Image (cartoon, rainbow, N blue to C red):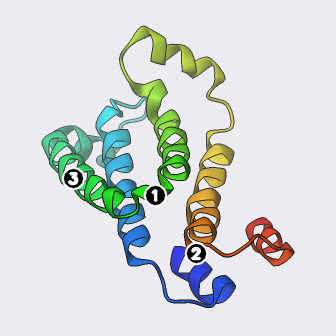
Amino acid sequence: MTGQTFHFLLRQDINWDLAAFIFFATLCSYSFHWYLTTGSVIPSERMNWLQQHRNLYIFIFTVALAGACFFFLRIVAYWPWLTISALATFLYSAPKIPHPYFRLLRRVAVGKTIFLAFVWMYVTTILPIIVSGKPWNNSFSLFIIS
C-alpha cells in the first residue's frame, strides 16, 4: 500500500527505508499484540497454536524491533511523524498489557477496527507523502479519503 502511494500518487520511486521501517514495525506490532493475546472463550486451533508458540512471538518481536530501530535511524528526520504512528499502534494493543493503568483502556477500546483503519491510512498514505517532501495538494486529500 505504501508502494502504491509512491507509485500512483507521488509518481516517484518508493522510499525503501520508509517501506522497510513500516514492514519491521508492523511485524513488531503484530507480534507484540498476539503475544499478549491469551485464551479465548471459544477454543480454536489458532489460539492453541498461539499458546504453544509464544516464544516464537518474542523472537519475531525482538528481530522486528531491531529492524524497525535500524530503519528508524535512517529516516530519523521524520521522527515526529513516525512517533505518532508508533504511539497509535501501541494504543491498539495497550489494553492487553497486564497492568492496571493499561487495563483501564479497555473501557475506551471501542471501535478498534476503525482505529486500526485510520492508523493504516496514516502509515500507508500520509507518511509517504510527508517523506516525499512534496507540498500538500487536493489530490493527496482525495487519495487518502479513498
At mark 3, the secondary structure is helix
Choose mark 3 or mark 2, whichever is in front: 2
**Image quadrant assignment for residue 72:** bottom left
Q: Give the residue at x 13% y 41%.
A: 55
Amino acid type indicated by mark 2: Ser
Q: Quadrant of the C terminus?
A: bottom right
Rendering coords of residue 78 (x, y %): 50, 57
Rendering coords of residue 42 (x, y %): 42, 34
Q: Which mark is residue 114?
A: none
Amino acid type indicated by mark 1: Ala
Q: Which mark is residue 66?
A: 3
Q: Give the residue at x 42% y 62%.
A: 22
Amino acid type indicated by mark 3: Ala
103 and 16: which is toward the camera: 16
Determine whether, in the image, residue 57 is placed left or right of residue 99: left
106 and 63: which is toward the camera: 63
At mark 1, the secondary structure is helix
Which tag, 2 or 1, sits closer to the chain's start?
A: 1
Q: Give the residue at x 48% y 16%.
A: 103
Which tag, 3 or 2, sits closer to the chain's start?
A: 3
Choose mark 2 or mark 1, whichever is in front: 1
Q: Is residue 40 above or below residue 18?
A: above
Please give the residue where the numbered disc 1 appears in the rendered image: 77
Determine whether, in the image, residue 66 is placed left or right of residue 142: left
Q: Is residue 49 above or below residue 123?
A: above
Please give the residue where the numbered disc 2 appears in the rendered image: 132
Q: CA distance from mark 2 to mark 1?
A: 12 Å
